[in-house]
C-alpha cells in the first residue's frame, strides 16, 4: 500500500543525495501529496476540485467516469509549497470496486457529502469505514459537507457532521463549490495537517 | 484563468472545443474535411460496386426481384433463405432498384431542403439535435440518390407496418424508429451474417423475457419479422456455417470494408452504418422498446395499483437507478445543443428502457455518454437497439453490478503494456504510477471525453465493426506508443498523468491514431485477449466474492426472513405449522433458492395455495377460533424466528455449495496462482537485481562525484597557495619597486648635485671649452638613465610620475 508511494520518494531522496543543490522531491519545503476524493455521486466532488484548481464553477459538470486527475500547488504562510495530486473518483456504487486503485497510497482523503442529502451522508460514513479498514494507516481524512449554499434545503445538520468527524479523528468543514465558500480553506487546512517529512541530514 | 470572455468553438459534431485546443482543432479541421471527401468517394464506390455486383449476377430483365434475391444470396444463404426476411428486405430493396439512379448525385438545388426535411421528419424530435449535422444532404444523396432518399421515407418506412398508423397519432409518445437506408442494405446484410449468430440468441433471450410482458406476445402474430425468429435462427446457423463456403467473395468485401472502416465512416452515414454493424435490424423486436417504456410509465404512474401485472419482474426500474439516471442527464454532454429538454427526455427513455431490458446491468455511469452519442446520430429506438448490442454483447460484463470484465481487462492491458513497453512501465513503476489509473477511465468511457471527438468516432467505427474490444486495447497501446517517449521524461506521478491527459486530449490526428492502433498491434487479437482474460478473471472474481461475502452472509438472511414474514402477514392466513415446515423442507432443495430469493411472488403463490388448504380445515366456533388464532399467532412468531434461522442455515448451506463448486476451480486457481507467484518472484528478483544494479550505479556515480569533489577541493587549495605565493611575490616586487624608486630619486638628486657642482666648476674653470664635450655628453647620458628608469617605473606602476622629467626638460631648455 504505502510502498507504492514511498518507492519514488525513497529513490528521489537518493537522487537528491547525489545532487545536493537540486532540491529533491522529499524537500520539506515543497511537499507533494496524493489526495483522493470519495463520496456519493452528485455531491459535488468534481465541482470542488474544479473550483480549487481552476477557480471556476460549472453548474453543468460532466459525469466522472472511472476517475479523473488534476493537480494544484498552493503556498503556505511559512513559505512551504504543497502540490496536491488529486484523484476525483466516480460516485456510483458499483464503481466502488475500482476505488481502492485510487485511494491506495493516498496521503489525504476528502470524503464529501451533500448537506441536502442524508443518503449521501450515510455514504460518506461508508467511505470513512472503508478507508479506516483499507486506506493508508496515517491517512489524513477530511469530512466535507458540500452545497452549503443550499442552506434552506439542508437535511444534514452541521453538528452531525462535526460529531461524526470528531469521533473519527477527521477534519470537518462545510463548503460550497458554487460560491467558493471554504474551498481554499479546506485545502489549506489539509496542508497544515500533513505530517512533515524530517529533512534528510 | 477564471472568467473573461470565452468564445465557444464547436466542432462539427456540435461539441465545444476546449479553449486550449481551438488552435489545433482549426488546424485539423481542414484535414478532416479533406479526409472526409476522400472517404466519401471510396464509400460511394464501394456501395455502388456492391450494388452492381448484386445486380450483375442476375438477369437484368427486372430490377426489383433480382436485387432482392441477390441481397439474400449475398448474406451467404444457400437458396433457402427465410421467405419472411426476403419479403422484409424486398420492399426496401425494391426502392433501391426502382430508383437505380444511385450514382447521380449532388448539385441539385432542391435537394438540400428536401433531404433535410426528410431527415428531420425521420428523426422527429431528435432531428433538432442533429442541427450540427446539417451537411447530411450531400452524403444522403451520394449514397441513396436524390430520388431514392425521398422514396426511402415512404418505402423504407413501410416495412414496419405499424409505423404509418402510429406515425401521426402515437408518434409523440412512442418514439421514432427508422430503417437503415436501402443503399446501406448491402452492408447491413453482410454484417448480419455475423450478428445473426449471436443476434438470434439475443432475440431468443428477448423472447423468453418477453414472456414476462404479455403485450409483446400479443404483437407477435401481427409482426412477421419476429415470428420467424426460430426459423431465422436456424437458417442463421446454417448461414454461418455455409458462410465459409464461398470464401473469395465474402472475404474480399469484408477485407475491403474493413479497410474502409479503418479509414473512417463518412460522417453522415455513420449513424446508419453503425446500426448495420451492430445488427440493429436483426436484433430488433417490434414494439419491445415501446413496451419497456410503457412498463416504466406504469411503474411511475400507478405503483400500487398495477402490482400484480408488472411488479417484481423486469418492469421495476429500481428507484436507485432512476435517481442516478436523473442526476446524470444534465451531466451528459452539457452544453450540447442536442441535449436540450427533448434530447434529455429521449436520453432518459433510452437509459430507462435499457435498465429494464437488462437488469443485470441496469444503469451504469458511462452509458449515459454512449446513449447520448448514439442519439446524436440516430432516432431513439435505433439508439436503444444499438446500445443493447454494445452493452449486452460487445461489453458484456463490463458495466454490470460487479464490473468484472472491466477489471479483468485492466489486468490484461497491464500485461500487454509490460510486454510491449517495458521501459515505459518501468518508469511508471518507478514513479509509483499504476497503468490502470490511466487506462481504466479510457476503457470505461470507450475514449469518450478523453480523445478529441473525431478520434473517438474513428475508434468507435472500428470497435462497432469488429464487434469486440480488440480496438480498445489497440488504441490504448497506440496512445502509449505515441506518447510513451514523452512520458519517460517526467519526474513525478502527477506529471505523468497530467502530461498524458493533455496529450491524449489533443490527439487530433485521428488517422494516425487509428492506423497506429490497427497496424501496429496486429498481434493483439481477440483470441489472445480471451486467453489473458481467462488467466486474470479468477483473481477478480475471488476478490469480488470476498467483498460481497462480508455483506451478503450478513444481510441476505434477514432479507429472506422479512420477505417470508411479510407475505404471510399480508395474507393474514392461518398456516398449519407442519405444512409450513414441509414447505420449507422442500425449499431446502437448493434449486429452489434463487427462485425463493428473487421471485417472492411465486413463493407467494405457493403459500397462498397452502393457506387455502389449511383454511379448509379451519374451525367453527368464533371463541375457539380466537383462542386458536392467538396460539397460532404465537406459533407464527416463533416460526418466523425459526425461519429466519433456517434461512440463515440455508444461506450457509448455499454458500458451502458454492464453495464446493468453487473448489475445483480453486484447485486450478491455486495452481495458476502458484505459477503466478513463481513468476512474480522471478520478476521481483529480476527487479531487485535491476534495482541493485541501479543502486550500484548510483553509488558509483556518487563515489565518482565525491572523488571529483575532492579533486576539485585539492585544486582549489593549490590555487589558493598559488595565489598566496603570487601575492607575496607581488608584495616583494612592489617593495623592490619602491626601493628602486627611492634609489632612482637618490641617484637623480645626486646627479643634479653633481651637475650643479660641475656647472659651478665649469664656470669657475678657466678653460670652459675643454669641459664642453663632456658636458654635452653627460646630459644625454643622464637623460638616458632617467628615461629608462622612469619608463620602467611607469610600466610597472602605471602611474605617471613626471617629477623626473622636469629637471630633464628644464635642463634641455636650459640648454
Ligand atoms: N448548489 C450547489 N450545487 C452544487 C455544488 N457543487 C456541485 N453542485 C452541483 O451538483 C451537481 C453534481 O456535481 P458534481 O461535481 O458533478 O458531482 P460529483 O458526482 O460528486 O462529481 C452539479 O450539477 C453541480 O451543479 C455546490 O456547492 N452548490
Ligand atoms: Mg464527478
Image: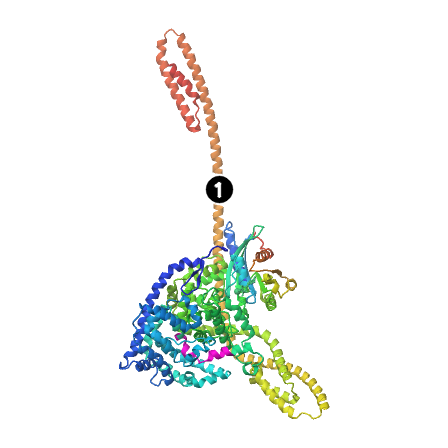
Chain of the residue that carries numbered disc 1 in the rendered image: B
SS at badge 1: helix
**Where's the C terminus of chain B, which quadrant?**
top left
Front-most of B557 and B182? B182
Q: Left or right: where does residue A188 sit relative to residue B248? A: right
Q: Nearer the viewer, residue B806 or B25?
A: B25
Q: In the displayed image of the protein, which residue is found farthest to the top?
A: B766
- Is B663 drawn above or below residue B693 in the view shown? below
Asked if the beta carbon under badge 1 is closer than 8 A to the nearest atom of ligand 2, the reply is no
Percent coordinates x, y for residue B65 in the rendering: 31, 82
Look at the image and say whether residue A44 sits in the magenta stretch: no
Task: Choose top left, top right, bottom left or bottom right for residue B547.
Answer: bottom right
Magenta portion: prevailing SS class: helix
Residue B201: % across, % down: 44, 81
Query: Residue B766 placed where, x, y %?
Result: 38, 6
Q: Which residues are magenta?
A: B276-294
Q: Position of residue B445 (x, y in %)?
A: 47, 68
Q: Is residue B285 shown in magenta?
A: yes
The answer to whether residue B187 is visible is no
- Look at 41% across and 26% down and name the residue there: B792
The residue where tag 1 is placed is: B716
Kindly tell me whether residue B573 is visible in this rendering.
yes
Coloring basis for residues: rainbow
Amino acid at each position: 500500500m504505502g510502498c507504492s508511494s514511498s518507492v519514488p520518494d525513497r529513490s528521489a531522496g537518493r537522487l537528491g543525495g547525489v545532487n545536493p543543490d537540486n532540491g529533491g522531491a522529499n524537500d520539506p519545503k515543497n511537499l507533494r501529496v496524493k489526495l483522493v476524493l470519495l463520496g456519493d455521486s452528485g455531491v459535488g466532488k468534481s465541482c470542488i476540485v474544479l473550483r480549487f484548481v481552476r477557480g471556476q464553477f460549472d453548474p453543468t459538470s460532466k459525469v466522472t467516469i472511472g476517475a479523473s486527475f488534476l493537480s494544484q500547488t498552493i503556498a503556505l504562510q511559512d513559505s512551504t509549497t504543497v502540490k496536491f495530486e488529486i484523484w476525483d473518483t466516480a460516485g456510483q456504487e458499483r464503481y466502488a470496486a475500482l476505488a481502492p486503485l485510487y485511494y491506495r497510497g493516498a496521503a489525504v482523503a476528502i470524503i464529501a457529502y451533500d448537506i441536502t442529502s442524508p443518503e449521501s451522508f450515510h455514504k460518506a460514513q461508508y467511505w470513512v469505514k472503508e478507508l479506516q479498514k483499507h486506506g493508508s494507516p496515517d491517512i489524513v481524512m477530511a469530512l466535507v459537507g458540500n452545497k452549503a449554499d443550499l442552506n434552506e434545503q439542508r437535511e444534514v445538520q452541521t453538528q452531525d457532521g462535526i460529531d461524526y468527524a470528531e469521533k473519527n479523528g477527521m477534519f470537518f468543514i462545510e463548503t460550497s463549490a458554487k460560491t467558493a465558500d471554504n474551498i481554499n480553506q479546506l485545502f489549506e487546512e489539509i496542508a497544515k495537517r500533513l505530517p512533515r517529512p524530517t529533512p534528510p541530514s | 484563468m477564471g472568467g473573461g470572455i470565452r468564445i465557444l468553438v464547436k466542432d462539427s459534431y456540435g461539441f465545444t472545443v476546449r479553449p486550449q485546443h481551438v488552435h489545433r482543432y482549426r488546424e485539423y479541421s481542414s484535414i478532416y474535411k479533406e479526409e472526409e471527401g476522400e472517404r466519401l468517394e471510396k464509400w460511394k464506390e464501394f456501395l455502388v460496386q456492391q450494388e452492381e455486383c448484386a445486380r450483375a449476377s442476375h438477369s437484368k430483365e427486372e430490377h426489383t426481384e433480382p436485387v432482392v434475391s441477390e441481397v439474400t444470396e449475398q448474406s451467404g444463404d444457400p437458396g433457402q433463405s427465410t421467405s419472411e426476411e426476403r419479403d422484409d428486405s424486398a420492399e426496401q430493396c425494391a426502392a433501391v432498384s426502382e430508383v437505380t439512379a444511385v450514382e447521380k448525385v449532388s448539385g441539385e438545388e432542391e435537394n438540400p431542403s428536401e433531404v433535410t426535411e426528410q431527415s428531420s421528419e425521420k428523426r422527429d424530435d431528435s432531428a433538432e439535435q442533429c442541427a450540427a449535422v446539417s451537411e447530411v444532404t450531400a452524403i444522403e444523396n451520394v449514397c441513396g440518390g436524390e430520388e431514392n432518399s425521398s422514396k426511402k421515407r415512404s418505402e423504407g418506412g413501410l416495412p414496419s407496418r405499424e409505423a404509418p398508423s402510429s406515425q401521426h397519432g402515437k408518434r409523440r409518445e412512442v418514439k421514432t424508429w427508422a430503417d437503415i437506408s436501402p443503399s446501406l442494405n448491402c452492408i447491413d446484410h453482410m454484417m448480419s451474417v455475423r450478428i445473426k449468430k449471436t443476434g438470434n440468441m439475443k432475440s431468443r433471450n428477448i423472447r423468453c423475457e418477453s414472456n414476462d410482458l404479455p403485450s409483446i406476445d400479443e404483437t407477435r402474430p401481427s409482426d412477421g419479422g419476429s415470428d420467424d425468429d426460430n426459423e431465422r435462427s436456424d437458417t442463421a446457423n446454417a448461414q454461418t456455417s455455409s458462410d465459409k463456403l464461398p470464401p473469395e467473395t465474402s472475404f474480399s468485401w469484408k477485407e475491403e470494408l474493413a479497410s474502409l472502416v479503418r479509414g473512417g465512416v463518412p460522417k453522415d452515414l455513420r449513424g446508419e452504418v453503425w446500426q448495420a454493424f451492430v445488427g440493429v435490424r436483426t436484433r430488433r423486436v417490434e414494439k419491445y422498446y415501446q413496451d419497456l417504456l410503457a412498463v416504466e410509465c406504469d411503474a411511475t404512474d400507478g405503483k400500487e395499483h398495477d402490482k400484480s401485472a408488472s411488479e417484481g419482474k423486469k418492469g421495476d426500474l429500481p428507484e436507485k437507478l432512476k435517481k442516478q439516471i436523473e442526476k446524470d442527464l444534465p451531466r451528459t454532454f452539457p452544453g450540447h445543443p442536442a441535449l436540450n429538454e427533448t434530447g434529455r427526455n429521449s436520453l432518459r427513455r433510452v437509459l430507462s428502457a435499457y435498465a429494464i431490458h437488462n437488469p443485470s446491468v441496469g444503469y451504469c455511469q458511462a452509458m449515459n455518454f454512449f446513449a447520448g452519442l448514439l442519439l446524436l446520430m440516430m432516432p431513439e429506438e435505433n439508439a436503444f437497439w444499438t446500445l443493447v448490442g454494445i452493452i449486452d454483447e460487445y461489453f458484456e460484463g463490463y458495466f454490470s453490478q460487479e464490473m468484472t470484465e472491466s477489471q479483468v481487462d485492466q489486468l490484461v492491458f497491464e500485461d500487454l503494456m509490460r510486454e510491449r513497453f517495458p521501459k515505459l512501465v518501468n518508469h511508471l513503476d518507478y514513479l509509483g504510477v499504476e497503468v490502470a489509473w490511466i487506462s481504466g477511465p479510457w476503457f470505461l468511457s470507450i475514449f469518450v471525453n478523453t480523445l478529441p471527438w473525431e478520434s473517438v468516432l474513428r475508434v468507435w467505427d472500428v470497435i462497432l465493426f469488429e464487434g469486440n474490444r480488440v480496438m480498445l486495447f489497440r488504441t490504448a497501446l497506440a496512445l502509449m506508443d505515441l506518447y510513451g517517449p514523452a512520458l519517460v521524461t517526467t519526474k513525478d506521478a502527477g506529471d505523468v498523468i497530467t502530461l498524458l491527459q493533455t496529450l491524449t486530449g489533443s490527439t487530433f490526428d485521428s488517422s494516425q491514431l487509428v492506423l497506429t492502433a490497427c497496424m501496429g498491434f496486429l498481434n493483439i487479437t481477440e483470441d489472445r485477449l480471451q486467453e489473458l482474460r481467462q488467466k486474470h478473471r479468477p483473481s477478480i472474481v475471488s476478490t469480488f466474492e470476498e467483498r460481497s461475502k462480508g455483506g451478503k452472509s450478513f444481510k441476505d438472511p434477514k432479507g429472506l426472513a422479512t420477505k417470508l414474514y411479510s407475505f404471510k402477514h399480508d395474507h393474514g392466513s392461518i398456516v398449519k405449522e407442519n405444512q409450513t415446515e414441509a414447505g420449507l423442507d422442500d425449499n431446502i432443495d437448493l434449486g429452489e433458492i434463487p427462485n425463493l430469493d428473487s421471485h417472492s411472488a411465486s413463493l407467494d403463490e405457493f403459500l397462498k395455495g397452502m393457506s387455502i388448504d389449511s383454511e379448509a380445515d379451519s374451525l367453527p366456533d368464533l371463541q375457539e377460533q380466537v383462542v386458536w388464532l392467538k396460539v397460532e399467532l404465537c406459533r407464527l412468531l416463533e416460526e418466523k424466528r425459526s425461519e429466519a434461522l433456517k434461512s440463515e442455515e440455508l444461506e450457509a448451506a448455499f454458500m458451502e455449495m458454492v464453495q464446493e463448486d468453487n473448489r475445483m476451480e480453486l484447485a486450478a486457481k491455486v495452481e495458476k496462482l502458484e505459477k503466478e507467484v513463481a513468476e512474480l518472484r522471478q520478476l521481483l528478483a529480476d527487479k531487485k537485481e535491476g534495482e541493485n544494479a541501479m543502486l550500484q550505479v548510483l553509488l558509483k556515480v556518487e563515489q565518482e562525484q565525491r572523488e571529483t569533489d575532492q579533486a576539485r577541493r585539492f585544486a582549489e587549495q593549490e590555487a589558493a597557495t598559488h595565489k598566496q605565493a603570487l601575492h607575496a611575490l607581488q608584495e616583494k616586487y612592489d617593495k623592490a619597486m619602491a626601493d628602486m624608486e627611492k634609489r632612482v630619486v637618490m641617484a637623480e638628486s645626486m646627479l643634479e648635485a653633481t651637475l650643479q657642482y660641475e656647472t659651478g666648476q665649469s664656470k669657475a674653470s678657466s678653460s670652459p671649452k675643454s669641459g664642453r664635450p663632456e658636458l654635452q655628453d653627460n646630459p644625454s647620458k643622464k637623460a638616458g638613465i632617467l628615461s629608462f628608469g622612469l619608463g620602467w617605473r611607469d610600466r610597472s606602476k602605471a602611474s605617471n610620475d613626471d617629477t623626473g622629467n622636469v629637471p630633464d626638460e628644464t635642463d634641455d631648455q636650459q640648454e
